[in-house]
């Protein structure tokens, strides 16, 4: 089925809907990641300690706590989207993210309010984690429902274009601030600026999302199983487990080569923080640009084949790539190696939301996608940095590489369970 199936007006309406949904996604992830990139500057303000690694472990712990809220967010917002419509769920999640960011921007430090400071920082992160947990499933569902037939992989890939775009903007804002402000100014108050930017952007996104049209029907929203755990586990447990299986490896390798990589280049390869920032900015930009191409590829070769390639290549190349990065001295070589890793990850990320959405019927779709993603992501994605740093302090850094490899092999096995393309292209609306 080609896209000529649509009228010009219908096409442009659907494209606007993709833009509206993904704009919020961009803001959500910008706000979520700014925390990771600013941590080196505000860690001392909330966790006074003589050892910078302890400070980073504490902030990484708060980062992980944000992930632990995701399953709850996935459940609450998935239920909301399946019962009360995708649009309502999308608007509430971006509003919550705005509130979390604003809260971090205005937080007093440990020096002024003692242990209340890290406690409130944790609370703000939990609100953000709840919001992001809800965002992913609903956006993936919404985008899979408005994507044009025959080009679903291409259109759905924009979920990760904006997700990576959010990460990239977070890095860029930090890089710009590093040029403009001194190290002392950044530590004193400069780190608050990105959180203010994020909360303003969230308000703009809210305006865009208000004009989205609803993709779920009244009939599916009123279904007795709509958005219920009973409906999901009772009838679609196998699909849920399959999604869980390949999302675990997908999340782990994604966070290993994106958020953790910056610290890995500094801590393990001994690169300067600035050089590591440049390498990651370049690699993330390339990663973002590649998504639609890998999405188009999946429209050609089928979702299942894309996922099998992801699992197989990830299993074969994780250890060699991480071992090579360990001893890399030239920033350009580091960029090439990280980019190669991200190409492998792109087989998954470009269609990640779509592959999940196509596994569930409309009445439990947002819940199925959101919850499966959030559980796997919290367990394996959110903990990636923590596990890697923990093993490094024990002098067992290489064990981490094999752990990622094992999870990729599992992702490959679960991808074998995906239906052949023909069976599930007919879930159209």
Image (cartoon, grey):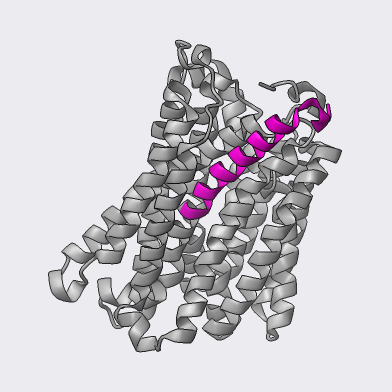
- All told, the count of numbered labels is 0
- Compare residues 402 and 314 and report the one nearer the observer: 314
Residue at the far right in the pictured view: 300
67 relative to 140 in the view: left or right: left
Residue drawn at point x = 74 percent, y = 33 percent: 8
Residue at far front of view: 9
Q: Quadrant of residue 52?
A: bottom left
Residue 203 visible: yes
Up the image or down, 142 lies above or below 174; here it is above
- Nearest the eye: 194 or 395: 194
The residue lying at 71 percent from left, 65 percent from top is 286
Of the pair 255 and 37, the residue shown nearer to us: 37
| Image quarter hosting the N terminus | top right
The structure residue drawn at horizontal position 66% and vertical position 21%, both measured from the top left corner, is 429
Q: Residue at x 37, y 61 (%)?
A: 61
Measured as percent of width and height from the top left, residue 254 is found at 61, 56
Q: Where residue 149 sits: x, y (%)? A: 76, 30
In the image, residue 24 lies in the stretch drawn in magenta: yes
Q: Quadrant of residue 253?
A: bottom right
Which range of residues does the magenta coloring cover? Answer: 1-27
In percent of width and height, residue 70 lies at 42, 44
Can residue 243 be found in the magenta stretch? Answer: no
Decide if residue 312 is in sight here.
no
Residue 89 in the image: state x and y as whole percent: 43, 34
Most frequent secondary structure within the magenta stretch: helix
In screen coordinates, is 377 left or right of 283?
A: left
Left or right, residue 405 beside residue 80: right
């Amino acid at each position: 089925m080609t896209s000529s199936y649509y009228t010009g007006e219908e096409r442009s309406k659907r494209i606007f809907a993709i833009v509206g949904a993904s704009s919020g996604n961009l803001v959500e992830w910008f706000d979520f990641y700014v925390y990771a990139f600013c941590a080196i500057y505000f860690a001392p303000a909330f966790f006074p300690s003589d050892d910078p690694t302890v400070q980073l472990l504490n902030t990484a712990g708060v980062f992980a706590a944000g992930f632990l809220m995701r399953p709850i967010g996935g459940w609450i917002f998935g239920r909301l989207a399946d019962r009360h419509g995708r649009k309502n769920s999308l608007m509430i999640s971006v509003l919550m993210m705005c509130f979390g960011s604003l809260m971090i921007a205005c937080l007093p430090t440990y020096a002024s309010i003692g242990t209340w400071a890290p406690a409130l920082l944790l609370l703000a992160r939990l609100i953000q984690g709840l919001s992001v947990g809800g965002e992913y499933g609903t956006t993936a569902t919404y985008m899979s429902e408005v994507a044009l037939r025959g080009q679903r992989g291409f259109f759905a890939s924009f979920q990760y274009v904006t997700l990576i775009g959010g990460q990239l903007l977070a890095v860029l804002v930090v890089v710009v601030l590093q040029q403009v402000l001194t190290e002392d100014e950044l530590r004193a108050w400069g780190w608050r600026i990105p959180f203010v930017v994020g909360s303003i952007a969230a308000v703009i996104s809210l305006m865009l999302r208000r004009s989205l049209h609803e993709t779920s029907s009244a009939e599916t929203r009123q279904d007795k199983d709509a958005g219920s755990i009973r409906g999901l586990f009772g009838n679609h447990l196998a699909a849920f487990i399959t999604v869980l299986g390949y999302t675990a490896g997908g999340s782990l390798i994604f966070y290993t080569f994106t958020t953790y990589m910056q610290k890995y280049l500094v801590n393990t390869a001994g690169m300067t923080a600035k050089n590591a920032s440049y390498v990651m900015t370049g690699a993330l930009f390339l990663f973002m640009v590649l998504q639609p191409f890998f999405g188009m590829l999946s429209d050609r070769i089928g979702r299942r084949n894309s996922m099998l390639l992801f699992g197989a290549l990830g299993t074969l190349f994780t250890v060699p790539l991480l071992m090579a990065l360990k001893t890399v001295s030239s920033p350009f070589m580091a960029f090439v190696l990280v980019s190669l890793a991200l190409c492998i990850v792109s087989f998954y990320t470009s269609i990640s939301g779509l592959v999940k959405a196509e596994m569930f019927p409309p009445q439990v779709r947002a819940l199925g996608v959101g919850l499966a993603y959030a559980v796997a992501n919290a367990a394996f994605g959110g903990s990636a940095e923590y596990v890697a740093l923990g093993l490094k302090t024990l002098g067992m850094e290489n064990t981490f590489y094999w752990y990622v490899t094992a999870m990729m092999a599992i992702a490959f096995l679960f991808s074998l369970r995906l239906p052949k393309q023909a069976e599930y292209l007919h879930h159209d609306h």
